[in-house]
Image (cartoon, helix red, strand yellow):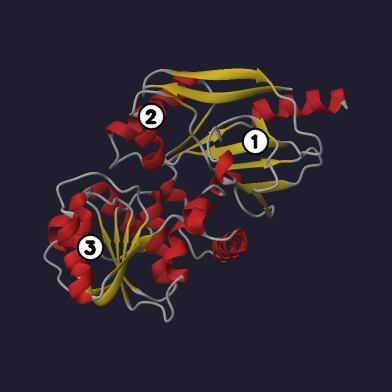
Amino acid sequence: MIRKILTFNGLDNVSFTTEEYVPPEGGCVLFTDFSTVSPGTELFSIREGRPVQPGYIRTGHTADGQHCFVFPSMAESSAGHCNLHAPGPGSLLLPLPDGLPPELAGFLRFINIGLHPFCRRKPLPERVAVIGLGPVGNLAAQTSKLLGCDTTGVDPSPGRRKLAARCGIGRAIPPEDFNTRERQFDLVIDTVCSSSSLEASARSLKDGGGCSMVGIVKDGPFAASQLCREIWNRDLHFESGWEMKNPLSRTEQNLKRGLNWVLAGGYTLRPLLSGIVEPEPEAIRAAYRNLADHPGDCFCYALDWRRLSERSSRRRAGYQ
């Protein structure tokens, strides 16, 4: 079987690495239907300029037609933009029902990320702020509302705040407004984790409140001693929001919970998809460039691998 893997060497240098793929013995090949771009994580690594094979969100089907969402192990959390792969034993396959549009199924990963901070809190927080209204933040705010929390979204982009309103997030404010909020929130979900957002998180939390650091923590001028002083004086809790730290059993529960909410109409997903892209280098390059240059207007893309996967699946059937 021939496997094609999306490869970047800088933002505008897009190609496919092609290889003969031999599945591991006993491995079940999953032919990719769609892979979903995670703009924050992927652009962060691509902009470093070294060759990278991004992608960790993928749905596909087995040779007998079972459609699945893939939650990969840490070892398989890259090179997800490919036409086929045999997930290892540490990865989770979640069967997908026919009623879920396959191009939207990748949003389950973002739902899981945003649900993770709430699993650690009993009782649930009354007032929640979500910093950054990209795919993770938008869906974290939607989850917060589903759970009955009073929810405020924060983003500098008017386009993203407008999109949040379309998704039922009634209160979305710019950072300069959030910076004036002192001791108002029980939980802050920080999908940005910059020096300025962490400082604003500390300021906005009630005494005893917590911040879930979902984003990759960035370097910046905010002194560790200043943050630690706030934590010490006011019993604040800053913790990792990295969902890969969850046991796989908890992740499976979260994914099933999110899937049930999606099927029940609890989430607004369609407006979050800026487009569906054929797996052609120029089309992919343009989509990633849009995400980098116009983040307020271009939100998230799904890559449609079905044509290539069907070809591979037919070859596989003939081989067997």
Q: Secondary structure at mark 3?
A: helix
**At which x and y percent is residue 32?**
65, 36
Question: On the image, which quarter does residue 12 sit in?
Answer: top left
Does label 1 or label 2 sit earlier along the sequence?
Answer: 1
**Quarter of the image where the N terminus is located:** top right
Q: Residues within 10 Å of mark 3 (few under 14, many from 20)?
A: many
- Residue furthest toward the right? 320
Q: Are marks 1 and 2 in contact (CB under 8 Å)?
A: no
Q: Are marks 2 and 3 in contact (CB under 8 Å)?
A: no
Question: On the image, which quarter does residue 118 sit in?
Answer: bottom left
Q: Is residue 10 above or below residue 273?
A: above
Q: CA distance from mark 1 to mark 3?
A: 39 Å
- Residue furthest toward the bottom? 123
Q: Secondary structure at mark 1?
A: strand
Q: Secondary structure at mark 2?
A: helix
Q: Residue at x 48, y 70 (%)?
A: 119
Q: Circle 2 sits on which residue?
A: 46
Q: Residues within 10 Å of mark 1 (few under 14, many from 20)?
A: many
Q: Is residue 142 above or below residue 72?
A: below
Q: Residue at x 70, y 37 (%)?
A: 86
Q: Circle 1 sits on which residue?
A: 32
**At which x and y percent is residue 54?**
48, 33
Does label 1 or label 3 sit earlier along the sequence?
Answer: 1
Q: Residue at x 62, y 63 (%)?
A: 249
User: Which three-letter amino acid code belongs to the residue tagged 2?
Assistant: Ile
Does label 2 or label 3 sit earlier along the sequence?
Answer: 2
Q: How many marks?
A: 3
Q: CA distance from mark 1 to mark 2?
A: 22 Å
User: Which three-letter amino acid code belongs to the residue tagged 1?
Assistant: Thr
Q: Circle 3 sits on which residue?
A: 201
Residue 103 is left or right of residue 93, and the answer is left
